[in-house]
Image (tube, grey):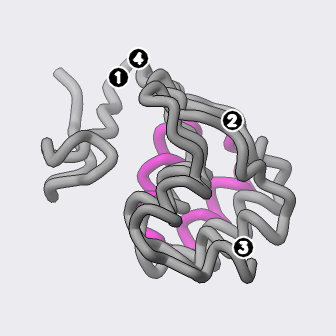
Amino acid sequence: MGIELATRPCAMLGGRRAGIVVDEKTPALGRMLLRAAFSGGVSEVSEALRLGADVHFRSELEVTALMIAAWRPGNLESLMLIADAGAEIDAVNVRGESALIGAVKERCFDNAKELLRRGASKYLRDEDGMTAGYIAKISGWDFFERA
């Protein structure tokens, strides 16, 4: 039986409870990094990376630690640590959502700006055909044009 890390409604999942499920089959360091990214704990992320956690590790829904950090408000430092460790900025999950698309959907503007600064593509499309730029535009968020 898996452990669900998230417990709040999440726009990324159409209002359903967010869920990054990890179980005993998940490699230990990958699991540690996903949990650390979810909690936003900089020291936990640093420790997981120091121990050799793979920044490219993905959950069963193809979610990476960078995505988790990007989609949570207040996780900018953790996001930067994971990105600095070589995480793929434009990786996408099973729904075609990149870290940037999720950051915009979740209104994590500081995270979105950092991803853009690091070269994240504004033009990737999720499974609904929407780009991060389009989502920002229809939501009236002018930060995207200035980033």
For the stretch drawn in magenta, the main secondary structure is: helix
Q: Amino acid at mark 4?
A: Lys
* Res 39 seen here: no
Nearest to N terminus: mark 2 or mark 1: 1
Nearest to N terminus: mark 2 or mark 3: 2
Which residue sits at x=64%, y=63%? 47
Q: How far across and how far down the image is residue 68, in percent?
A: 48, 52
Q: CA distance from mark 2 to mark 1?
A: 24 Å
Q: How far across and how far down the image is residue 114, in percent?
A: 72, 73
- Residue carrying label 1: 24
Q: Amino acid at mark 3?
A: Glu
Nearest to N terminus: mark 1 or mark 3: 1
State if disc 3 and disc 1 touch (CB < 8 Å). no
Q: Would you place residue 33 above or below residue 109 in this image?
A: above
Which of the labelled discs sits on residue 25, or is there none? 4
Q: Amino acid at mark 1?
A: Glu
- Residue carrying label 3: 114
Q: Is residue 29 left or right of residue 124?
A: left
Q: CA distance from mark 1 to mark 3?
A: 33 Å
Nearest to N terminus: mark 3 or mark 4: 4
- Nearer the observer: mark 2 or 1; the answer is 2
Mark 4 surroundings: few (<14), some (14-19) or many (≥20) residues within 10 A: few
Residue 78 location, quadrant:
bottom right
Which of the labelled discs sits on residue 91, or is there none? 2
Tell me, yes or no, whether the highlighted magenta stretch contains residue 137: no
Which secondary structure, mark 2? loop
State if disc 4 and disc 2 touch (CB < 8 Å). no
Residue 48 location, quadrant:
bottom right
Which residue sits at x=77%, y=49%? 121
Q: Which span of residues is magenta-colored? A: 28-54
Q: Amino acid at mark 2?
A: Ala
